[in-house]
Every structure is written in C-alpha cells, then in structure tokens.
Image: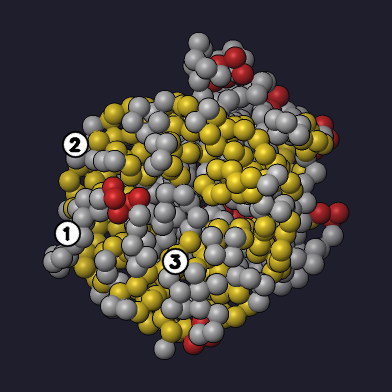
Amino acid sequence: MRAGQHAWFGLALTSLMVPMMASAQGIKSYAPVTQERLNNPEPANWLQYRRTYDGMNYSPLDKINTTNVKNMVPVWTFSTGVNEGHQAPPMVNNGVMFITTPQAQVIALDAKTGDLLWRYKRQLPEDLFQLHPTNRGVGMWQDMLFLATVDDFLVALDAKTGKELWAKPVGDYKKGHYLTLAPQVINGKIIVGTSGGEFGVRGYIVGYDAKTGNQLWRTYTVPAPGEPGSETWKGDDWKTGGGSAWMTGNYDPATNTAYWGIGNAAPWPGDAHPGDNLYTASVIALDPDTGKIKHHHQYHPNDSWDWDEVDPPILMDVTKDGKTIKALVHPGRNGYLWTLERTPEGISFVSGIPYVHQDVFASIDPKTGRPTYNEKTTPKVGKDVTFCPSLWGGKDWLSATYSPKTKLLYIPANDNICGRVVGEKKPHIEGQLWLGAELEKLDLSMKDKKVPAYMGELQAWDVSGGKKVWSYKFPTQLFASAMATAGDLVFVGGTSDRYFRAFNATNGELLWQHRTNSGISGGPTAFEVDGTQYIAVQSGWGVDAQRIQDSLAKLGIPGVSPDVPQGGVVWVFAVK
C-alpha cells in the first residue's frame, strides 16, 4: 500500500513478527546518565526528548551559525529499514547516538561515523492495530535506556549492549491502549502516559522504578466519582472519557513539579459528554514522587474538536507589567498562544492570543482564560460542522522552540486549514475506534473555501510583547518540530517537498536547505564530538503528516500530491 492510501485513522499491522535481539558489537565506553546531567546537560549532548527539562528544544552550540551554515553538508546517513513516521529526535550521549523508529526499534550508532553499535527490535503481536505507528525516543538513566512501545509495554535496555533487562505491561493493547512517547526520567523514576483517546480509554500517567520496573504510582487523568474534578463529568462518562497523555512532559527541578499536557475528551462531540471534563485539554502539574495532581489549567472545557493539548508548555521567564514571571508558554492545538504563570500555589492565566485563524472562541475571560464558544463551529451529535483550525490544530504535538539568546519563541504552525466533523452517536465497544464522528465524512477545508496563499508558517514570537516578529510561509502544510541554536539558527523540516531547512533566528531569512529521502516530521538535534558540531534529524514521512497530505490532495489544491516518498533515514550534517 503506497503512502497516499492510508486510512484516516489506522494502519493494521498483521504480518510483522521480528525477534527480540541485540547485535554484538556493543559500546565499549559509556557515560552513565545521572540526575545532575539531566538537570544540567553538557552542551555537546542531547539526553532528553527536548534536550532540557524546561522543554525549550534549544542547543547552546554555536559553531554552526548564520555565517557558515551555507557550507553545511551531509557527513553520514543511516537507513532504519522501516517505513512510516519517524518522529524521534536523534539523542546523543558522549558520542553515542540512540534513535527509535516505528515498529519498536532502538538503534545505537557511533555519532561521529554512523557505524552501527547495536540494534534492538521488539516482537510485536500479529493482531496489533497501530493507530499511530511511531515512537518518539528513549529515556536515559544511568547505563539503561527505556522504550515505550505501541503494544503498551515499558521496556528497559542495557545502554551498552541493547540487551533487554525487563519489560512491564502498562495497559492492554487489545483495549486500545498504546504508547508512542519518549519516557520522562526524574530521579530514577520512569514516567509514561498512554495514548488511546480515540478508543474511549480512561487516560493515565504512570511512574515506574528504573531498576526493577515496579509500578510506583498511577494517576488517572479523568477523575472517578468523589475525586477532585469528578463533578465536571456526568454519569458514567468518566469511564470512557479519553484524556490520554501521549507526549513527554516537562519538569521544574526547583519545585519538583512535572508538567504534562492532556488530550481530548472522548468521543469528540461535546454534547456526548456534558460538562467541563477535567482534566482533558489541560496542563496538569504532577508530583513525580507520588503522581499527585497539584494544579491544573484547562485550555478549553468540554473539548469537541479533537484538540489534544498534549504538548506540554515550555518553562521560561516572561516579562509582564514590568516584572518577570515564571511562565508556562503553550502554542495550543486550539490555535491560541497561551501564557500562564506557575507558582507553588497554582497555575494562573496571563494571556491567550490567536496565532492562526480561529473561529471557535467567541471570547476569553481576561481573568481566568476560560473561552466561550461559537455554537455554529462546535461539533454536536447529528450536526455537520466546519471549524478552524482543523482537528490537527494550529500546531499539533510538534515542539515549538525558544531561544534564550534571541528571546523569541518559534512555532511550526499551520494556518488557513479548517476541518469538518459530522457528529454521530455510537455505543462504545472496547478496543474499537470511538470517534463520535462519521469517519467517511471527516475532511479538511480551507478558510473562506478558497485556496490560500499559504498553509504552513514558521512563526517567531516575542511572548512578553505579545507580538509576532517574523514568519516564513509555505504553500502547503508544515508538520515537524523545530530547534533553535545559539548560532542564531532555527532548523525545521515538515514539508512534503522533503527539504530540511535552516533560518536566521533573528529575521527569518532562509539560509540553507537540503532535500532528504522523505519528508521530515521529527525534531532535529545538535551535538558535538571531538570539537565538531553536528546537526541530526530523522527523515521518514507518515502517520498524521501523510493523512493531512491525503486530505489536502483531495481538495485539488495545485501542486499538492499525496505521493510523498517514505523510508526512514538518519541524516547527520556538519560544516565542511
């Protein structure tokens, strides 16, 4: 089946059966990952999903910069051997690169040469239905790696050899539970969150002991009767309420608080689950020792648009009214740029402004940030509704990036793309898709029903000033995480033309581009070995990027084809 023939919300894996294995070469010298290193990673390394706990997705390396990036060339590539969406950042620990791919594979490479050190493949069950067949990276602790798998296991590996140390079930894949995120590691605890909102699961976040794999705590993101927030649900809706947490959280070591984004309510139409529906479409503040929810902020109550707000807010300082506040900054899937203040007492609203065209919010309360909705753009059972932005949002799960050097936030956005949902009422059947929408009528549309001048847009924002400083527009979608560096550069892929690009971080000028084998939806990373700086990214189109591409192609937009080559390849660049 070619890439352009994906069904909207699924890809069945019925024939892949590969043995668990690790190749023999191994790693002779490995630097254990300590809590001190996670708190303050060396500039040369990329030890976490977004590099640092604050989620800035920023590298302090500057040997590749605005003056020499034009001389950047590929120095090695490595084919992963699988198709579908490669969404994991290449992670580097003292010259060793770890990548994960679809089909629960971990590959260890020499970061300087691309030589294979070892490879691990998990045996996946033949009856596994992979709604999002992808993986977003490993967690690192001491001399161990941690992999969250689509068959809903947390697996520990020996970082030197790839040997499996233990594997623990997190949930039941036959009931629609699965894992796609990079595990979060805090003080020897491994924290993961489930996917599966479209199956009507009750979402949760779970903490495990790194050495033993024993479960330490499990926090449900939809409260049961009697628990805080339970009054925002009616009847038994909480049992199938969604609220999955499928992107790695960020963390504040100073207050020992993890911030996780929580996804959509299930099913999609809000009148099928009346109430505010905590803690869906929210950010929650967790105690990583106990899993207790300390605080929360809900971006939009009674979610009806599949606007998962799972991408956690960036922890950064923002100036408001002449004073510096400890902020949580979140370019929401709902199309608004949110600034919140985090304090020991809670999370408070600061501002919310649209960064793409949005026709759902009629107003926002200036004190609480609570929106009111336009009824005509709110999906309901039995209604045919179009709304902007689409269910994939102004920005999906993809990471924005913040540069403390330029003091700008860079958002990989999509504008002018709207969505259509026809609500339907169907009984919940465990393990089956439960969207609350007629699948064959899910569609995209354009703002004002016209072919827009642009859809993808890399935006640079002065968050303190509340203004967009510059933007670079693309004729089609932009679907990839971005990375800023101290070389005053912003790197991003995300377009169906398969280019990887570098922009001047201060003014948005395109400085460099290189075409890869496939489209890029994963995040780039920067690292250094033996005094040379490198930029790395995985190219491999698929999953939602391809689904959006299919839908745009159906609209007959000139120059938009569903045929984007697939196949995973790691690309590593340096200046020569």
Residue 433 position, x and y percent, is 54, 36
Residue identified by numbered label 2:
212
Q: Which amino acid does label 1 sit on?
A: Thr
Mark 3 or 1, which is nearer the eye?
3
Of the two numbered discs 2 and 1 on the same chain, state the one appearing first in sequence. Answer: 1
As displayed, is residue 571 above or below residue 435?
A: below
Q: Which of 15 and 337 is in front in this view?
A: 337
Q: Is residue 365 above or below residue 544?
A: above
Q: Distance between the residues labelled 3 and 1?
A: 30 Å
- What's the residue at 66%, 29% (across, down)? 301
Residue at the spot of label 3: 60
Q: In percent of the image, x 73 and y 31: which residue is there? A: 367
* Residue 246 can be seen in this image: yes
Label 3: which secondary element? loop
Which-is-in-front pick, marks 2 and 3? 3
Residue marked by disc 1? 161
2 or 3: tag closer to the N-terminus:
3
Q: Would you say the residues marked 3 and 1 are in contact, meaning their CB atoms lie under 8 Å apart? A: no
What is the residue that sits farthest to the front in this orientation?
322
- Residue pictured at 72% horizontal, 59% vertical: 468
What number is the disc on residue 298? none
